[in-house]
Structures are given as structure tokens and as C-alpha cells.
Image (cartoon, rainbow, N blue to C red):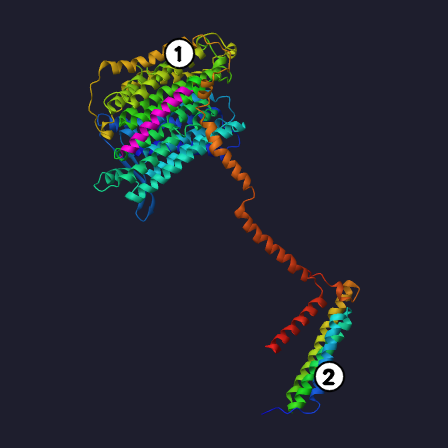
């Protein structure tokens, strides 16, 4: 059965892609760990938005179920990541990610 | 009784092991007395056992032969090698010489080496040598023989370089080792060839196989020539004779035992042992005789020109072994072994006497600074004179009987005047000249530089072996070994008196010439005519080998200083190290850098997927 492209899908996908690229660009450019964390959240949200858009498009509840998972995942991720950031700051007295390069070859 | 025979090589081995192991149990170096008891006692006991076996088993029963199987050594397909001994009269004669003369030289060494700090090491090496030499002559297969053969080579190397602190001694040891190794390689190839052709290396089996109907004579000739190569190396014959004069760097009793009485005659023993093989090949026999004849002349003339007393004796040894090869080449097997025996007596005597001279003169070896010693060290003088008389084969000494035997055999070879006989006769004249030259220079005439502070160094432990050897050298000619059972009986031929007369006259003429030339030689030292200089240098063989082999080899090694083959492997290693350095720069520890490359990589990958 050919999939009919509902109006608004393209716009949704485009929005998600832009959001994801913004997040990725932020990750690559930002040096502050907290901002990087926020960029990760943007990426996650872009993915979640994609699920919702796709679910709405196919009239399927799976997309919304996945959204719930993603939100949970994001919460867990932030909990762990913030703990890591705290440790990082505790040791280095900075939140500059470039200072964290002890694993160089 | 046969078990007694197995103890003969074992005892010196035990002596060696004990001497080597002493530091494991004792912190202090044991006294010389203890070392002497172990070192000399083990060989003395072996000599005693040998004599008992000789008397009990062989006396009056010359055809007796014994086989002893100790254990199986190698079993690979049809190669079966045992640690087995085969004893017949040929072996017995060698055993008696090795243990008997070996014992006397051990005993003498106790006196000669008494001032040396490495007393224990010396006797350990000497015992190991006796063990290896006994294995060599007892072996019933050629591989076991080769084991002993290499063992004596090793001990020779160790003992030539015994005073290793002088680099010259080390160089002499290396030269001896490398030059004899050339011969040994030829011999090893000969053994492979024999095994390939006859599928056995057991000597009695080999002998029965080659007497079969379908034997390839070319192979036999080739194998004989290769074995001759080994014999030539070990016995210091042409063209591998250059190592023996240099081998005199070792202690003098070592020269007596290894480089005169036993090891250097191993080549003669090998050919005598393999004589059924040689009898099949005219070419090989001729080669053996030619090598002998050429060597005896060449070394004899070299001996005339030497100024070092030990080098005279070294060249004389080469020359006398040349006689043995000559005898082997004309098929006078028992003559060769007879001369081997008498030579062991009188050359050991000569070397030990020379050792006494050297020790009395505080390690002076130049004959031109000696002279007039007959009053100062009379016993040594008498012993040396007896030795010289035997060496020159004056009538009624042991050397006379054995050399006469060889000269007559050479005469019979072509039933008349032939080049081998002429060489032998000329050699006898030369032998007379050089042996009495050194006697006159050392003991008669005016006193030289070194003679003035001569002090008799003989102590009883040295005098006794000298006296016994002197008696053996004088009367050893009466002990012609009963070798007919091994070599068969040769028909006696009647010889006209003038042949016999020539053989008797030649040494006497040599004596007269030496008397006239060297009785009052001016001791001006080292001035030599160019001919004498040529002889002095051993006919320039060292020079030839140096220019023909050593220098080109050194040149090649210099070119290949950085091994060409090695550079391939080194290149591989360098490339991987460079790659590693390159890759490790990407591991910079920057999370954002990883992420960026990851993102770029993902995009490229996706693009690739889309494009495809």
C-alpha cells in the first residue's frame, strides 16, 4: 500500500533535522560541558520529535510509546551526566572539556 | 672383563666432571695435590684397565675382537646408531698409546704447570680430551667416531688458547679451530655420502657391504677423498697444515699430548680404520700417498729454518705424519700404525724435554739464544738426544724400525725407484738435518744469552715420565703391534742391501751435515737468506691463505657491514613504527575531535549508502 504523505510531515521532518543538526553542531563547537549536555538534550528531543511525527503520520501509537522511552532515557542521562560533570568540576576546577585529554595516544 | 673396557673412556670423563664440579661443593680452590690425584689418577686408572684388558683378552690371541654395546643412541628409519665400541688390535694399540702416553704426560704436567693458577682448568681440559680421544678410537660407527673427533677438536681449541689473556694465543686457537673445521666439513659430507650410498655407518657393516658385487667405484672414490679431507685437517697435512705450528701457543705438555702423540694422528687412524674402502680406489690411495710425500718434504724443509724450539718440533710432527700418510697411500697399513706408535713415544719425549728446556730457561724458546746446555741440564740433554736419534731414525732406535718399514713399502710400491720412495729418502735426510740442528744449537756449542741463567727445573714428577718415555722411545721398535688380523699379511720381499743401506745412511749424512753447519753457528740471530726465510714462513702458505681467503672475506664482510637481508626486516619494523606514530596522533584525548570525526564519518557513510 503506497504511503500517503500527510500534510505537515515534511515540515516535521525538516524541523527535527534542523534541531538535530543544531544539537550536533553545538556538541562539536561548545567547550563548556554543561552546554554540551544541553546540546545532547536537543539531539535527543529532535529524535523524539521524529518519533512523534512519524507516529502521527502513520496513525500508529508506537511513536508516542517511543517518545515516553526517550524522555525517560533523557532524564536518566541527565542524572548520570550531571554527576559526571560535578566530578569533573571537582577535579579540574573547570568545565572546559578540552582540559580532559588524558587519554591521548 | 669387557665391562672393564667401558670404564676406560668413562674414568677420564669422571675426572673431568669432578674437576669441573668442585666449585659447586667447595668454596675454596682445592690444593694442587688433590687436583693432581683426580686428574692424573683417572687417566692412570684407565691406562691400568687398558693394560689388563690387553693382557687378558688379547695376549697370544691377535685375532680377537670385542664388541660392546652400551646403549642405543639414535634410531631414525634405517639409521641405527649405538653407543657401541669395537675393539681389535688397531684400537688396542691406539688405546695403549692414548692412556699410556697420556698418563705420562699428565704426570709430567703436574710438575710443568705447578706455578700456574689455572691448574684445575688445565687438568679438566686434559681429562676431557683423553675421554674424547678414547671415544674416537673405540667407536664402531662413524658418527660416534665423529663425536670423539669433534670432542678432541674442541679440547685442542681450549688448550691452545689456555693462556687466553694473550690475544695471540686466542688467535692461534681460533686458527686451529677454523682450519680443522674445513676438513671436518669435508668429512661430514663424506659420511652423508657413505650413508646415502650404503645406508649404514657402522664400520664393520660398511666394510662387508662395500665388498659386495655392485659397488659404485666413483662414489667410493669420492667418499674416500672427502674422508681424506677430514684426515688432512686433523693431521695437519697439506694443504691444511698451517694451524699446527701456531698451535704451539698452548702449554708444552699439551703440544706433546695433543699436537704430537694423539689427536693429530687421528687422521692416520681414520684412514687405517677405513682401509677396505681405500683399497677399492686407486685414485684415493694415490692422493693419500701424494699428500704424505709432499707434506713430509715441505714440513721438513720448514723445520730446518725455524728458530723457535717448539715450532721445529711442530713442523717435524707434520713431516712425520706425512710419512704415515705415505705409508697408508702405499698400502702399508701396519707400517703407518707402527710409525704412529713409535712417533708417539719419541715425539712426546722430545716435546717434554723441550718443555724442560723452556722451563729451565724461564720460558725462552728461541734456539739462537740457547746453547751449551748439556752441562747444566744433563738429564734433559740425554732425553732430548734419544728423542732426536729416534726422530732421525738412527739405527736400532724405535724410529728406525718404523721408518724403515715405510721406506721399504714405498720401494715395493712400484718395485723399484719411484717418486714416493725418493721423497721418503730425501725426507729422511732432511729429518736428520733438522733434528740434529736443534740438538746442536740448544745443547752444544757456545752458551747463548738465555743459557747463562739456566736453572734445572726438573722435579721427580717430571723426570720419571721423561725416563720412561726415553726407554719406550729407544726400545719401542721391538713392540711391533700384531696388526695382521686387522690388515692382513703382506708378503715379505727380499731387498738388495743398497736400498737398506740408503735408508740407514741418509740420517747419518743428515747428522754430518748438521754437525758441519750448526756445530759452531754464529749466533747472530734472525738474519736469514731469502730461501730460509721462505722455508721459515712455511712455504708462504699463511701468506697465500691470508691474501686468497682471509682478506677477501674481511672485505666482503666490510661491504655487507649493514646486513642486506637484515635491512628488509628492519624496513618492515620501521614502517609499522611510522604507521603507529601516525595513528597515535589521532588519539589526542579530545572528545569533541572524536565526535567531529564520528559525525563526518557517519555523513560520508550515509552518503555512500545513498549513492549506491
Q: Distance between the residues labelled 2 and 1?
A: 123 Å
Check disc 2: other Cα within 10 Å, few if <14, some if 14-19, many if 20+.
some
Name the disc covering residue B514, or none. 1
Tag 2 secondary structure = helix
In-image side of B367 versus A63 (left or right) = left
Q: Is residue B299 magenta?
A: yes
Residue A24 painted magenta: no
What residue is shown at x 39% (from left), y 31% (from top)?
Answer: B233
**Residue A4 pos. (x, y %):** 64, 92
Q: Is mark 1 on a helix, strand or loop?
A: helix
Q: Is residue A33 above or below residue B89?
A: below
Total marks in image: 2
The magenta stretch is B281-302
Residue at image coords 24%, 30%: B486
Chain where mark 2 sits:
A
- Residue B558 visible: yes
Q: Quadrant of the C terminus of chain B?
A: bottom right
Residue B252 picture location, percent across and down:
45, 22
Residue found at x 24% / y 24%: B414
Q: Nearest the camera: B278 or B377?
A: B278
Tell me the chain of label 1.
Answer: B
Nearer to us of marks 2 and 1 is: 1
Residue B579: x and y in percent read: 62, 58
The residue to which callout 2 is attached is A15
The picture quadrant where one finds residue B316 is top left
B365 and B541: which is toward the camera: B541
Amino acid at each position: 500500500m503506497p504511503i500517503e504523505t500527510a500534510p505537515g510531515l515534511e515540515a516535521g521532518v525538516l524541523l527535527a533535522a534542523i534541531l538535530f543538526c543544531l544539537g550536533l553542531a553545538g556538541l562539536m563547537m561548545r567547550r563548556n560541558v554543561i552546554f554540551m549536555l544541553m546540546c545532547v538534550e536537543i539531539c535527543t528531543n529532535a529524535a523524539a520529535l521524529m518519533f512523534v511525527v512519524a507516529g502521527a503520520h502513520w496513525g500508529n501509537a508506537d511513536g508516542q510509546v517511543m517518545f515516553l522511552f526517550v524522555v525517560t532515557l533523557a532524564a536518566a542521562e541527565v542524572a548520570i551526566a550531571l554527576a559526571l560533570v560535578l566530578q569533573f568540576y571537582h577535579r579540574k576546577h573547570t568545565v572546559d572539556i578540552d582540559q580532559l585529554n588524558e587519554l591521548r595516544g | 672383563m669387557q665391562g672393564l673396557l667401558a670404564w676406560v673412556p668413562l674414568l677420564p670423563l669422571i675426572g673431568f666432571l669432578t674437576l669441573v664440579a668442585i666449585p659447586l661443593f667447595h668454596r675454596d680452590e682445592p690444593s694442587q695435590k688433590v687436583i693432581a690425584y683426580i686428574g692424573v689418577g683417572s687417566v692412570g686408572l684407565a691406562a691400568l684397565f687398558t693394560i689388563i684388558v690387553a693382557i687378558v683378552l688379547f695376549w697370544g690371541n691377535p685375532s680377537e675382537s670385542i664388541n660392546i654395546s652400551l646403549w642405543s643412541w639414535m634410531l631414525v628409519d634405517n639409521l641405527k646408531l649405538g653407543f657401541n665400541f669395537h675393539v681389535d688390535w688397531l684400537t688396542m694399540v691406539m688405546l695403549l698409546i692414548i692412556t699410556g702416553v697420556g698418563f705420562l704426560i699428565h704426570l709430567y704436567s703436574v710438575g710443568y704447570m705447578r706455578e700456574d693458577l689455572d691448574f684445575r682448568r688445565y687438568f679438566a681440559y686434559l681429562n676431557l680430551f683423553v675421554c674424547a680421544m678414547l671415544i674416537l678410537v673405540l667407536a664402531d660407527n662413524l658418527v660416534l667416531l665423529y663425536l670423539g673427533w669433534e670432542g678432541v677438536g674442541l679440547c685442542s681449541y681450549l688448550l691452545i688458547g689456555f693462556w687466553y689473556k694473550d690475544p695471540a694465543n686466542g688467535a692461534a686457537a681460533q686458527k686451529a679451530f677454523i682450519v680443522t673445521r674445513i676438513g671436518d666439513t669435508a668429512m661430514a659430507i663424506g659420511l652423508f655420502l657413505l650413508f646415502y650410498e650404503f645406508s649404514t655407518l657402522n664400520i664393520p657393516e660398511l666394510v662387508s657391504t662395500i665388498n659386495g658385487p655392485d659397488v659404485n667405484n666413483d662414489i667410493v672414490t669420492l667418499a674416500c677423498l672427502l674422508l681424506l679431507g677430514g684426515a688432512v685437517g686433523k693431521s695437519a697435512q697439506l694443504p691444511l697444515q698451517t694451524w699446527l705450528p701456531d698451535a704451539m701457543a698452548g702449554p708444552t705438555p699439551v703440544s706433546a699430548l695433543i699436537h704430537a702423540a694423539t689427536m693429530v694422528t687421528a687422521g692416520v687412524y681414520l684412514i687405517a680404520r677405513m682401509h677396505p674402502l681405500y683399497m677399492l680406489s686407486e685414485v684415493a690411495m694415490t692422493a693419500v700417498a701424494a699428500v704424505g710425500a709432499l707434506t713430509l718434504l715441505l714440513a721438513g724443509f720448514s723445520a730446518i729454518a725455524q728458530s723457535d724450539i717448539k715450532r721445529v718440533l711442530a713442523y717435524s710432527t707434520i713431516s712425520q705424519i706425512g710419512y704415515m700418510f705415505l705409508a697408508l697411500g702405499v698400502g702399508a697399513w701396519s707400517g703407518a700404525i707402527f710409525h704412529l706408535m713409535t712417533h708417539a713415544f719419541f715425539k712426546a719425549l722430545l716435546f717434554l724435554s723441550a718443555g724442560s728446556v723452556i722451563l729451565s730457561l724461564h720460558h725462552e724458546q728461541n734456539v739462537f739464544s740457547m746453547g751449551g746446555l748439556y752441562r747444566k741440564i744433563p738429564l734433559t740433554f740425554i732425553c732430548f738426544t734419544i728423542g732426536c736419534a729416534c726422530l732421525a731414525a738412527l739405527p736400532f732406535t724405535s724410529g728406525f724400525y718404523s721408518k724403515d718399514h715405510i721406506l721399504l713399502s714405498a720401494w715395493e710400491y712400484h718395485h723399484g725407484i719411484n717418486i714416493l720412495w725418493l721423497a721418503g729418502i730425501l725426507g729422511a735426510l732432511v729429518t736428520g738435518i733438522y733434528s740434529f740442528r736443534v740438538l746442536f744449537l740448544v745443547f752444544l756449542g757456545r752458551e747463548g744469552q738465555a743459557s747463562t741463567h739456566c736453572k734445572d727445573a726438573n722435579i721427580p714428577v717430571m723426570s720419571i715420565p721423561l725416563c720412561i718415555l726415553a726407554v719406550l722411545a729407544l726400545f719401542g721398535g721391538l713392540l711391533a703391534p700384531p696388526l695382521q688380523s686387522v690388515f692382513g699379511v703382506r708378503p715379505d720381499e727380499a731387498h738388495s742391501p743398497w736400498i737398506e743401506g740408503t735408508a740407514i745412511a741418509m740420517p747419518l749424512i743428515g747428522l754430518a751435515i748438521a754437525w758441519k753447519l750448526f756445530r759452531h753457528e754464529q749466533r747472530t740471530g734472525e738474519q736469514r737468506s731469502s730461501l730460509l726465510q721462505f722455508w721459515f714462513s712455511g712455504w708462504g702458505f699463511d701468506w697465500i691463505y691470508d691474501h686468497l681467503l682471509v682478506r677477501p672475506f674481511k672485505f666482503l664482510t666490510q661491504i655487507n657491514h649493514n646486513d642486506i637481508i637484515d635491512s628488509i626486516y628492519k624496513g618492515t619494523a620501521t614502517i609499522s613504527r611510522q604507521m603507529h606514530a601516525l595513528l597515535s596522533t589521532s588519539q589526542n584525548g579530545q572528545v569533541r575531535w572524536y565526535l567531529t570525526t564520528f559525525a563526518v564519518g557517519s555523513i560520508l557513510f550515509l552518503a555512500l549508502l545513498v549513492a549506491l
